Image: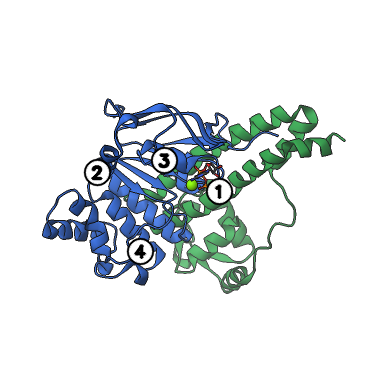
Chain colours: A blue, B green
Amino acid sequence: MTTPLLTATGITKDYGATPALRGVDVRVTEGEIVAVTGPSGCGKSTLLHCLSGILRADRGSVIFRDQDIGSWSEAARSRLRRTEFGVLFQFGQMVPELTAAENVGLPLLLAGSGRREARQAALDWLDRFGVADVADQMPGAMSGGQQQRCAVARAMVTRPRVLFADEPTGALDQLNGEQVMQAIVRTVREEGTSVVLVTHEAPVAAYADREIVLRDGAVDPTGLGVAAP
Amino acid sequence: MSTAHVLLGLLAGGPRHGYDLKRAHDERLPQAKPLAYGQVYATLGRLERDGFVEPSAHEQDGGPERTAYTLTHSGRDRLAQWLTEIEPPAPYVTSTLFAKVVVALLAADADRARDYLAAQRAAHMARLRELTAVKSAPGATVGDVVAADYAIGHLDADLRWLQTTLARVADLQKEVTA
Ligand SMILES: Nc1ncnc2c1ncn2[C@@H]1O[C@H](COP(=O)(O)OP(=O)(O)OP(=O)(O)O)[C@@H](O)[C@H]1O
Ligand SMILES: [Mg+2]
């Protein structure tokens, strides 16, 4: 399928005097996995946050299903992230005071589901990511790989149309990182979820259908992501 | 790679025909270049000449395709020795990628080197995606995964080198054209 699901045009974002994005265009079609790569500080996380409505771009538009979500209120964008968008952050994901199952079920509770229903769905999703056995453990008692699988389960529990993942394997060793990527790709293919995958590692980007390379806040057509001195 | 030693290894479990060795080789070393039958028979011929394999007694009158080969004592010793030998890490840096960057700077200019680096990166990424698909395919064997991992690791190393070299092209040009 090639229907554009998410179309960002001319995304520009400054942090005070620091320009983080200078007019970035991104199109994501239904079911497509798009990698966003480039060196540290090139604006990958900022782009992901603008696309997912966590940040509002200074200029440019983010169109999701014919609606410019950039013009939406904070509350409306945050509702979108509990329904149609799933987000996997670069750092610190789990609520430390809640068990794995409670963490995963949280988005459903916030969206109005009952406790029993949320727990059942959480257990199903933990099972799909191979961590059903840690359902009643606290994040502090889990390995990094287990925590990351739970974080993916939580991002997918609402069956979002788009999953935004920021360095989903960044804190994991190679084998665990690979298992997490395999689980993500298998699941999004089954669900038909589109993915925006931020990474600076080529083997992770290779799971994507396509790659956008950023350099200094702009798309780098050479794909090298390094300023030519 | 030493096809002769791999064939000795495949014969360690018992006698096999040439076509059987080819099939076993291609199955056990997936993603490797498939062995040609001609290469199998040529290699078996050399191994027989050197006393490492011999035709199984009861099939001696067939042609090479009808003959099953068996490991000799000396073949077993050779195989055991090969398995204990380490492969010395390459003593010289030989890479066409590296040579091409240097020659691009000598014969043309920094832009030529950068264009080459960008095109090579695109080709490496495309191959990386293919191999990732191979290892992620539902029917992938452990052998497929291990073979793909090996190639992915090497492509990743090249990709890192391509990226850091791009940042050094201008300095390298100064050095080679000084
Ligand atoms: N909250 C902030 N306040 C000020 N500057 C910021 C902030 N967040 C990011 N920046 C700056 O914006 C630029 C882009 O940052 P961003 O985090 O998007 O990069 P990144 O590509 O995700 O980097 P990394 O690979 O290290 O995660 C950098 O120069 C960074 O220092
Ligand atoms: Mg980042």
Identified by mark 1, the residue type is Asp
Chain letter for mark 3: A
Residue that carries the numbered disc 2 in the rendered image: A191
Instruction: Please tell me whether mark 1 or mark 4 is closer to you in this view.
Output: 4
Q: Chain of mark 1?
A: B
**Marks 3 and 1, Cα distance to the nearest angstrom?**
24 Å
Residue assigned mark 4: A146
Q: Amino acid at mark 2?
A: Glu
Question: Mark 2 falls within which chain?
Answer: A
- Report the residue marked by disc 1: B156
- Asked whether A76 or A166 is in front, the reply is A76
Residue at the image position 58 percent from the left and 36 percent from the top? A224
| Amino acid identity at mark 3 | Leu
Dot placed on the residue nearer the N-terminal end, 3 or 4: 3
Position in image of residue A147 (x %, y %): 36, 62
Q: CA distance from mark 1 to mark 2?
A: 30 Å
Quadrant, the N terminus of chain A? top left
Asked if disc 3 is less than 8 Å from ligand 1, the answer is: yes
Q: Chain of mark 4?
A: A
Badge 4 density bin: few <14, some 14–19, many ≥20, Cα 10 Å: many
Look at the image and tell me in which quarter the C terminus of chain A lies: top right
